Structures are given as C-alpha cells and as structure tokens.
Image (cartoon, rainbow, N blue to C red):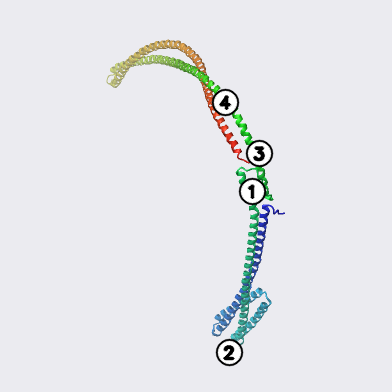
Amino acid sequence: MLDFGTIRGRLTASYLVLLVFLLVVIALSAVRFQSLSDNIRGIVDENAALVELTGELNVNAESLASRLLLLFVLEEREARVAIYKEIDERNRNMDVSLETMAGLVTSEKNKVAVEALKAQRGVYQAALQSTVEALEFGELDDAKKQMAGPTRNELQTFLNQTKALAGSERGMMQDRQQQVLSDSEVAIWMITGVGILALLIGAAMALLITRSIVNPLSRVADFLDRMAKGDLSQNIEIKPKGEIGQLVASLQSMRMSLAGVIEKIDLSARTVVDAVGNIRSSVSGVQQGSEKQEFMANEIQSSVKELSSGVTNMAEHVTVSRNQAEAAHDLAKHGKEIINAAATDITEIATYVEETSLSVAKLKESATTVLEFVNNIRNIADQTNLLALNASIEAARAGESGRGFAVVADEVRNLARNTAEVTESIDAVITSMTNLSVQVSDEMEQGQERMRHGVTQIENVVEPLARLEKDSEESLKSLDGLSGLAQQQSIEANDIALRITKIVEVSVNNNQTSLRLTSLTDALTGAAEQTKQATSTFTLPQ
C-alpha cells in the first residue's frame, strides 16, 4: 500500500497516474493505428488490385479484338499462326486475372460482379471462336458479319462490365480513404485530449506535492538558520509524517546532541586552562635540566673527539706498518721464487752440459772409429800401390804386349797415391777433432763442477729467505690483528662520539621543545579562552 504521507508515496502516486495516462495513450494509438493499417491494407490488397486487374482485362480484351482484325488482312499461314498463339496467350492472361480477382473479392456484390464477368468472358470467347472458325474455313463475309455483330457486341458488353467493376472498386477505395482520414482525425483528437488531460492532472499533482514538501522544508530551513546563529533553545513546531518527519526528528536529536557537546566543550576549556598552568611549571623545570644536560654532553663530546682522533692516528700508523710488512713478505716470497727459478735453470743447464759432454765423448769415439777406417784405407792404398808396382814390372817384362797393362798399372798407382794423400788429410782433421773433443770434455766437466757448486750456494740462500717469508707472514698476521683492533676501536670511538653528538642534539631538542611547549601552553591557554568565549555565544536549553 502507498503511504501518501511520505514524499516517496506522493511521487510514486503521481508517477503511477502519469504512467496510466501514458498507457491509455499508447493503447488508443495502437488500436487506431491498427484500424488504419487494416483499412489501408484493404485498399491496397483488394480495391487497388481489382482496379489494376480490370484494367488488364480491358487491355487483353481489346488486344484480342485487334489481333482478330489482323487475321482478316494476313494471308500467310505462319503469320496467322503467330497471331493465334498471341490470342491464346491473351486468353490465358485473362483467365489468370479473373481467377485472381475471384480470390481477392470479399463482398457479395463484388463476387456477383466477378462471376458475371467470368460468364461474359465465356460468351465473348465463344463469339470470338466462332468468328475465327468462319475466317479459317474461308467464309470471309460471314466472319465479317460476326465480327461486326455478335463478337463486337459481346466485347463491348465485357468491357462495360469491367469498367463498371473498376468504377465500383474506385468508389469503394475512395470511401475507405475517407474512412481512413476520418479515423486518423478522431485518433489525433483522442490522443491530444488524453495528453492534455494527463498534463493537467500532472500539473495539479506537481503543485500539490510541491506545496506539501516545500512548506515543511521552509520551516525546517528557518530552524536551521536559528541554529546557525547559535540559538539551540527552540523546538520545531511542526509534526509532519514521512521523510520530512524523519528529518525533523533528526534535527531535534542533532540540536540536543550539539547542546550537550557545547556544554562539554565549555567544561573542557575550563579544565584545559587549569591543566595548562600545571604544564607551564613542569616545562620550566624540564628546560633548566635540559640546559645542564646540554653543557655536560658538550664537554663529554670534546673528550671523546680527542680520544677518537688518537685512535684514528694509531690505526693509520698500524695500517702503514702492516703495508710495509706485507711488502717485505711479498719481496721475500718473490726473491725465493726467483732464486728457486735460477737454481732450476742452473740445474737444467748442468744437465744440458752433461748431455753435451756425453755427445762430445760419443763424437770422440766416432772420430776414433773413423781414424781406424782411415788407417784401413791407408793400408789398402799401400797394398794397391805395391800391386801396381808389381804390375808395372811385369808389364815391362812383357814388352809391347804388356804396354796396355802398364798404363792401367800407372793409373792404379796414381789412384793409390791420391788415396794415401786424402787419408793423410782425413787423419789430420780427425786428430784435430779428437784433441778438441778432449779439451771440450774437460772444460764441460769443470763447468759442471762449478754449476753444482753454484746450486749448492743458491740452496743455502733459499733457506734463510724461506724463514724470512714465514717470519714476515707471521708479522703480517699480527699486524692484521692489530690493525683490525685499531680500526674497531676507531669505529667504536666514532660511534661513541656520534652517540654523544645525538645526546647533545637531543638535549638541544629538549631545550627547544621546552621553549615550544611554553609557547604552546600560552597558545593553548589563549585557545581555551577563545573556546569559552565561543561557547558563551550559544543559547542552550534550560
């Protein structure tokens, strides 16, 4: 159920009334437009179609008559056959038009007219057929008489009936058009009237609803204006229902709540004034203590800065000593590596010299072997020379027959002499090589002995360097520990200095905060006094 005492109920009722009128307008429009649509559809589907079909019947009937006249002048059989085909086509078109018309007509009058038109179409077709048969059988005079008489009369009767049907349909179409126009005007007036009535009712409801809402709201606005000016002692004199009633109840509750809040604020302002006096005395004591704390913290900060500076210098000296010890350690390690490399190189050289000495010994042995071969060759050359001498003696004894053998013996002797000379040269070279090999072998043995002595001396140097490397490494570890300790002490000293600096800053901040608190207490006292003055402007209910 709708509650007309509420704004929602009133607005809903007005909307429902307007909606009802709108639905009525829509329903009337739909009914009238459906009627108009049916009439227009009847005009288009029946009357206009029948008029068009009667026109086609007239055209086809007259065309049949004209084609029949052509048969009187055409003598060729083929031309006349074409005319007959066209006449048959026209007859079929007329039959189709008549059947279509029979399906379109709805009134009894039109149905009777169509049936009469069909009967007259049969009579005209029979007269036309009789004329054609007379013409085909050569009875030209009889055909002309029938054409001028019964056929023409039946055609005219058929045309008159089609014209009468067409005129009747045109009259009905005009009547329907007038009915459509009349219905349209009635629909327009009805819709306009309903619309005007809906506007009048809507305007009346809007005026009533507006007055029922605006008048209470004006009184509520006056009440709010008095509250804005500080008057909380008066009530609203109206008791409406609905949403405005809820608004009035909420405003009454807000007025009472606001009055209670103002009373509490006034009481709180008095309490704040009393508490601020106590805070001011406490802040004064805190300020004096902060000043003493700041002075003592500054002195401690100076001492800690000197301590931190000394620890930092010690850490720097320890770092320098540590770097020097690290350099000595690296130098000893590098020297040890170089000497070990030198010892290794000398050992490799000694090994190479020893291998070279063995090669020289082998060369000496090879030279001795070659010398033995040379001695053998020398012996062979001496024997060859003796054989050549014996051959010469035997050739001389033989006389002329041994002359060729004597020439060969001379050549062999020359060859033996040359071989002896060559072997002497080889013997001299081999002897020189043997002497050089002996000398080189002796010098290499001396060099090996000296290199072995040098390796022993280098090994004697490596051991002190190893001890020096180990001792410097231990010293480096000790310095690393000392450096770490010094750095840790420096960090801790800096941390202490930083903490004392923060203590000083906190002391300064405390002092400044005390000053600000003093200012704030003064401001708070002024604000409390202003609050008391502000609350005194309100008129509270008794």
Is 413 placed left or right of 463 in the picture?
left
- Measure how far apart labels 4 and 2 are at the Cα level: 152 Å
What x and y, as percent, mark residue 317? Answer: 46, 16
What x and y, as percent, mark residue 418? Answer: 30, 18
Q: Quadrant of the N terminus?
A: bottom right
Query: Within the image, what quadrant is residue 404 found in?
Result: top left
- Measure how far apart labels 3 and 1 are at the Cα level: 21 Å
Using the image as rendered, state which of residue 343 and residue 305 is in the foreground: 305
Of callouts 3 and 1, the N-terminal one: 1
Disc 4 residue crowd, few under 14, some 14–19, many 20+, Cα 10 Å? some
Of callouts 4 and 3, the N-terminal one: 3
- Measure how far apart labels 4 and 3 are at the Cα level: 33 Å
Disc 3 residue crowd, few under 14, some 14–19, many 20+, Cα 10 Å? few
The residue identified by callout 2 is: 141
Residue beneath the point at 64% across and 37% down: 263
- Measure how far apart labels 4 and 1 are at the Cα level: 50 Å
Looking at the rendered image, the disc whose residue lies closer to the viewer, 4 or 2, is 4
